[in-house]
Image: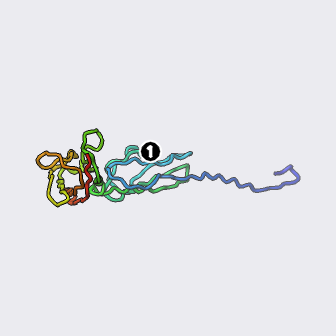
Amino acid sequence: ISDGICSDDDQLTITVTSEIEAIGGTDRSVCNSEVNLNATRPEFGYGYWTSLTGDVQIDDTSRAFTRVIGLNFGNNTFLWTVVNGTCRDYAEVNIFRRDSLECLPKIQLPTAFSPNFDGSNDYLVIKGLEEYPDNEIVVYNRWGQNVYTQKSYRNDWYGTDNEGYPLSDGTYFVIVKVNFINKVYNTYIDLRR
């Protein structure tokens, strides 16, 4: 600054910070070959997805929320990049695709049912078994006699013996064989009409 007689100078530093943060979402484990990525959209600038795994298809790489098709078994890594001018930030998201056998439903055996046709618990329903049609159920009475056997059981037993006669109230022992996963389940069943 000068008025012609005196002069003075000063220095002024202007710093502009545009701090950005990439938030890519949470890591997770899935059973399917597709998943939705869900990043947080940047307030300023733009973001985009890239796959660090390879052969997967991202529907729209420029959208924070987008679908991915063709996940590989095992770990799939995605990078959410946020750009604002010359500033960049990155966030990795890992999606682990589990093996098919790990994703099959669990078998849940009940311990009682009441085949009296009142509309409640009339059939022996084994949850998860409908996904395994190659199965067999064997029911024994308390003396160890086979009273009921059915291959490809469809949750339709209402407490009858092998000849179709109603079994008396009591405790029975059930063995369920699921051939696809090579497992055998055992339980007791309290049958009350």
Observer-nearest residue: 74 or 126? 126
From the viewer's perspective, is residue 43 above or below residue 9?
A: above
Q: How is the image coloured?
A: rainbow
Query: What residue is at 36 percent from the left and 53 percent from the top?
Result: 30
Image side of residue 140 versus residue 46, left or right:
left
Q: Nearer the viewer, residue 51 or 94?
A: 94
Which residue reaches farthest left? 163
Seen in the picture, residue 114 relative to 189 is either above or below; the reply is above
Q: Residue at x 16, y 49 (%)?
A: 152
Left or right: 114 with respect to 52?
A: left
Q: Name the residue located 27 percent from the left edge and 53 percent from the top edge.
A: 190
Label count reads 1
| Crowding near the residue tagged with mark 1, few <14, some 14–19, many ≥20 C-alpha atoms within 10 Å | some
- x and y percentages locating residue 93 in the rendered image: 43, 55
Q: Report which residue position mark 1 lands on.
A: 65
Quarter of the figure that contains the C terminus: top left
Q: Is residue 33 left or right of residue 79?
A: left
Picture coordinates of residue 149, whole percent (x, y): 14, 52
**Numbered disc 1: secondary structure:** strand
Q: Nearer the viewer, residue 29 or 57?
A: 29
Residue sitting at x 32%, y 50%: 32
Q: Position of residue 50 (x, y in %)?
A: 41, 52
Q: Position of residue 101 (x, y in %)?
A: 27, 57
The three-letter code of the residue at mark 1 reads Phe
**Left-right relation of 109 to 38:** left
